[in-house]
Image (cartoon, grey):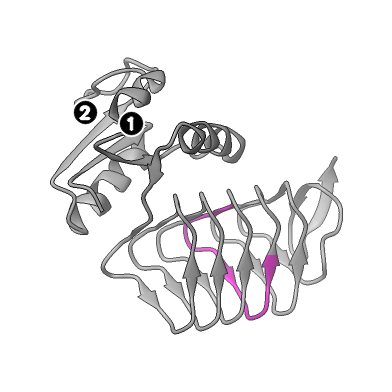
């Protein structure tokens, strides 16, 4: 771990990431962002990451899964090192793997045998139970619960308060709406809402 971390994205999520970075020992934390809406010490635009490749770690704090993936891949291809950030309050069981560029926010629980991919957001007070697999660039939102032996495909967005029952698979590029309950496998990309969750579009 280097002393400095550059966070790309200075919105609300980025400020949460900054707090976590400071709590795990980074001494210097600053932002790059293409917007001028945020007054949090932005030192340049996204493209300026190249200036910090040799002396900084990086984190992409952008909620959009597709955009986060694109920027992460760009940084890594230029030799940048992605940080993995886990808030000190998080409960992490044994035999858990967490990929690079992933953040696990305060109050989350990740139980034994879970595998979390790269570029994932495991948000506040969510739970990922035993033997779950969360694919790259997913977003597991605030208060979401994945029961045991769940598989979530890459880039899927599990919205706030959703629940996925045990032994369920959700394919890649899905949106599971806020408060939805998934009780059977989802094999087609799309948006799913309700209790039980049903597809509402392609």
Residue for point 41% across, 66% down: 125
Q: Position of residue 121 (x, y in %)?
A: 48, 53
Q: CA distance from mark 2 to mark 1?
A: 7 Å
Residue for point 19% across, 26% down: 41
Residue for point 67% across, 52% down: 154
Horizontal relation, residue 12 to residue 22: left or right: right
Badge 1, how many Cα within 10 Å: few under 14, some, many 20+? many
Q: Are marks 2 and 1 in contact (CB under 8 Å)?
A: yes
Horizontal relation, residue 172 to residue 201: left or right: left
| In magenta segment, residue 144 | yes
Looking at the rendered structure, the secondary structure element under dot 1 is: loop
- Look at mark 1 in the image and give the residue it sits on: 10
Of residues 128 and 58, the one nearer the viewer is: 58
Residue at the farthest top position: 36
In which image quadrant can residue 31 be found? top left
Horizontal relation, residue 134 to residue 118: left or right: right
The C terminus, quarter of image: top right
Q: Position of residue 152 (x, y in %)?
A: 68, 62
**Mark closer to the chain start, 2 or 1:** 1
- Look at mark 2 in the image and give the residue it sits on: 40
Our reading of the magenta stretch's main secondary structure is loop
Of residues 59 and 73, the one nearer the viewer is: 73
Q: Position of residue 17 (x, y in %)?
A: 32, 47
Of residues 81 and 83, the one nearer the viewer is: 81
Q: Is residue 63 above or below residue 154?
A: above
Residue range of the region highlighted in magenta in the rendering = 138-151
């Amino acid at each position: 771990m280097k002393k400095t971390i550059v966070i790309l994205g200075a919105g609300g999520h980025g400020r949460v990431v900054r707090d976590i970075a400071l709590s795990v020992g980074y001494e210097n934390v600053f932002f790059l962002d293409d917007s001028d809406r945020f007054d949090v010490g932005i030192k340049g635009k996204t493209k300026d990451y190249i200036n910090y490749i040799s002396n900084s770690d990086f984190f992409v704090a952008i909620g959009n899964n597709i955009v986060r993936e694109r920027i992460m891949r760009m940084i890594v291809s230029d030799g940048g090192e992605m940080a993995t950030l886990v808030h000190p309050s998080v409960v992490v069981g044994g035999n858990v793997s967490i990929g690079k560029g992933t953040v696990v926010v305060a109050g989350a629980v990740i139980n034994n045998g879970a595998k979390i991919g790269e570029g994932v957001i495991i948000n506040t007070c969510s739970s990922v139970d035993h033997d779950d697999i969360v694919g790259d660039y997913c977003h597991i939102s605030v208060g979401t619960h994945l029961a045991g032996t769940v598989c979530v495909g890459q880039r899927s967005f599990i919205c706030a308060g959703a629940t996925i029952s045990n032994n369920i698979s959700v394919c890649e590029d899905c949106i599971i709406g806020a408060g939805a309950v998934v009780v059977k496998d989802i094999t087609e990309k799309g948006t799913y809402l309700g209790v039980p969750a049903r597809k509402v579009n392609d």
